[in-house]
């Protein structure tokens, strides 16, 4: 397949994972193209946590700072492509081809899929609207962590109202009153 642009590594994803990969590869002077469709897993969160030096800060600012850092030091090897990849193929000689949503073909010797994960909401009226606004799958990402919260993450939905907490669990393990 003829390509319009050739790099060493195609990185699909401009979130923390893709940006980290790009930084390592840039340092080693590999040419990369980072594709970013602008859809992020934590889009609904105004603050990110547990990233050293970025605790309780805007995820968009983190991404912008990472891009600035990459551009400032490695602009000759890194390029940002703010567009979705719609198709990826691998040729018989091991070259990857990515087609972007404008039809441009990119080729790379390696491919990194750093495209994150997507939330699929249950078909429950109002669920999506409440997502991350009072209803949390993983409260420690959004609310101050407590020991009880850390022990109760799997298979739970939490609804944090003003002064009480509802816990909906799909597992047989129930929280004790003191944990809740
Ligand atoms: C509400 C909420 C709060 C969270 N808070 C935290 C937190 O505080 N701390 C924490 O560590 N984690 C948190 N997370 C998890 C968080 O989402 C991940 O840590 C982080 O975003 C994962 O980074 P990532 O690069 O893997 O994916 P993402 O940040 O989701 O990035 C995916 C990237 O892939 C791109 N992409 C996907 N498909 C394509 C395509 N076809 N073409 C081009 N680009 C594509 C997207 O545009 C995006 O750039 C939270 C998650 C949620 C839902």
Image (cartoon, rainbow, N blue to C red):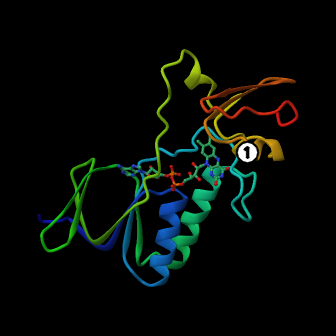
Give the camera-side residue of 159 and 50. Answer: 159
Q: Helix or strand or loop: what does disc 1 sit on?
A: helix
Q: If the image is split into quadrants, where does the C terminus sit? A: top right
**Could one spot residue 146 in this view of the protein?**
no
Q: If the image is split into quadrants, where does the N terminus sit? A: bottom left
> Pointer 1: what residue?
140
Give the camera-side residue of 43 and 5. Answer: 43
- Which residue is at a point 58% across and 58% down the rendered structure image? 64
In percent of width and height, residue 126 lies at 58, 17
Residue 124 to residue 119: above or below: above
Residue 105 to residue 165: above or below: below
Residue 26 to residue 151: above or below: below
Residue 99: quadrant of the picture: bottom left
- Which residue is at a point 46% across and 78% down the rendered structure image? 26
In percent of width and height, residue 73 lies at 54, 78
**Could one spot residue 84 in this view of the protein?**
yes
54 on left or right of 85:
right
In percent of width and height, residue 7 lies at 30, 73
Residue 49 to residue 154: above or below: below
- Which residue is at a point 48% across and 20% down the rendered structure image? 123
């Amino acid at each position: 397949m003829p390509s319009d642009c050739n790099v060493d590594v195609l990185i699909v994803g401009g979130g923390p994972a893709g940006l980290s990969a790009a930084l390592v590869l840039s340092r080693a002077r590999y040419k990369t193209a980072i594709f970013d469709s602008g859809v992020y897993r934590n889009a609904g969160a105004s603050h990110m946590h547990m990233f050293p030096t970025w605790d309780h800060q805007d995820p968009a600012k983190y991404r912008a700072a990472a891009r600035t850092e990459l551009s400032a030091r490695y602009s000759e090897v890194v390029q940002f492509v703010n567009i979705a990849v719609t198709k990826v193929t691998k040729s018989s000689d091991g070259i990857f081809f990515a087609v972007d949503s404008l039809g441009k073909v990119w080729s790379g010797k390696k491919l990194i899929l750093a495209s994150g994960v997507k939330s699929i909401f249950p078909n429950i009226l109002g669920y999506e609207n409440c997502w991350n606004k009072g209803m949390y799958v993983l409260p420690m990402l959004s609310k101050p962590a407590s020991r009880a919260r850390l022990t109760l993450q799997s298979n739970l939905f939490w609804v944090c109202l003003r002064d009480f907490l509802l816990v909906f669990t799909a597992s047989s393990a129930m929280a004790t009153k003191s944990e809740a």
